[in-house]
Image: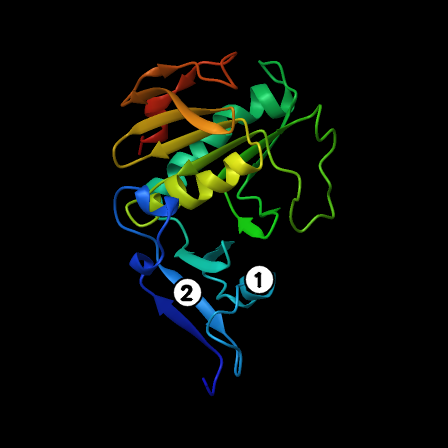
Amino acid sequence: MIENPELLHVPSALFTGRGARGVGSATECYLFRPMGDPAERRATYRDVLAAPPHVVAEVVRGVLHTQPRPGAPHARASSRLGGQLDGPFDRGKGGPGGWILLDEPELHLGDDIVVPDLAGWRRTRMPRLPMEAAFFTLAPDWICEVVSPRTQAFDRGDKMDVYGREGVQSAWLVDPLAKMLEVWRLEQRKWMRLATWTEDAAVRAEPFEAFELELGSLWAD
């Protein structure tokens, strides 16, 4: 029995399955074990709320995953991408509108709790932003994960599995160190990679193909 509540580090190699197929360094995994609880207790939203404020806390398959807040290249790429998409697709300025786009929304999808770097809902499915919501239970239509050596095994593995299970139709994976964008589409509940762009390419990619994305701006100083 553990006498005091603690966050226990668990090597991610102990967790097998589809989430192990990613590349790069694995994420750090933690199990929050209150006093007297058995070691096999599944993590819940309570564990997310109890996590330190300086980390991003997520729960997938009953395991609490924590990552430090994004570094500068990650934050820059995410901010620049959101800024380019906001006007034409969320506000309808210079583009078709029809979307609600959010930075780092907390998604409660079944028993899993995930936080994509960006997510978007078509207004045909979510006409208004629920202003009082602390989290969202409606799966988005599009997500973007900005990957890093620390997070990409988790982002490409378990989190993509959750998004596919919940019917998210489009996923973008941005790697600011490799200066690369991958675009994925869900077809018959399986992810298919449609295209990859690198460096300073001019990109038209679904579901935002009405707009030309300046990919090089995501890596700019």
Q: Residues within 10 Å of mark 1 (few under 14, many from 20)?
A: some
Query: Where the C terminus falls, by quadrant?
Result: top left
Residue that mark 1 sits on: 44
Earlier-in-chain disc, 2 versus 1: 2
Q: Nearer the viewer, residue 97 or 209?
A: 209
Q: Residue furthest bottom?
A: 3
Q: Nearer the viewer, residue 79 or 45?
A: 45
| Dot 1: element | loop
| Numbered label attached to residue 30 | 2
Percent position of residue 33, x then y = 49, 74
Q: Nearer the viewer, residue 209 or 10?
A: 10
Percent position of residue 156, x then y = 38, 39
Q: How is the image coloured?
A: rainbow
Query: Height in image: 116 above or below 64?
Result: above
61 sits to left or right of 174 = right
Question: What amino acid is at disc 2?
Answer: Tyr
Task: Identify the residue shown where x is 57% and y is 44%.
Answer: 105
**Whole-number angstrom distance, CA of label 2 to CA of label 1:** 12 Å
171 sits to left or right of 97 = left
Query: Height in image: 178 above or below 152?
Result: above
Question: What amino acid is at disc 1?
Answer: Thr
Task: Identify the residue shown where x is 36% and y is 29%.
Answer: 218
Query: Height in image: 26 above or below 87?
Result: below
Q: Nearer the viewer, residue 70 or 217?
A: 70
| Dot 2: element | strand
Q: Residues within 10 Å of mark 2 (few under 14, many from 20)?
A: many
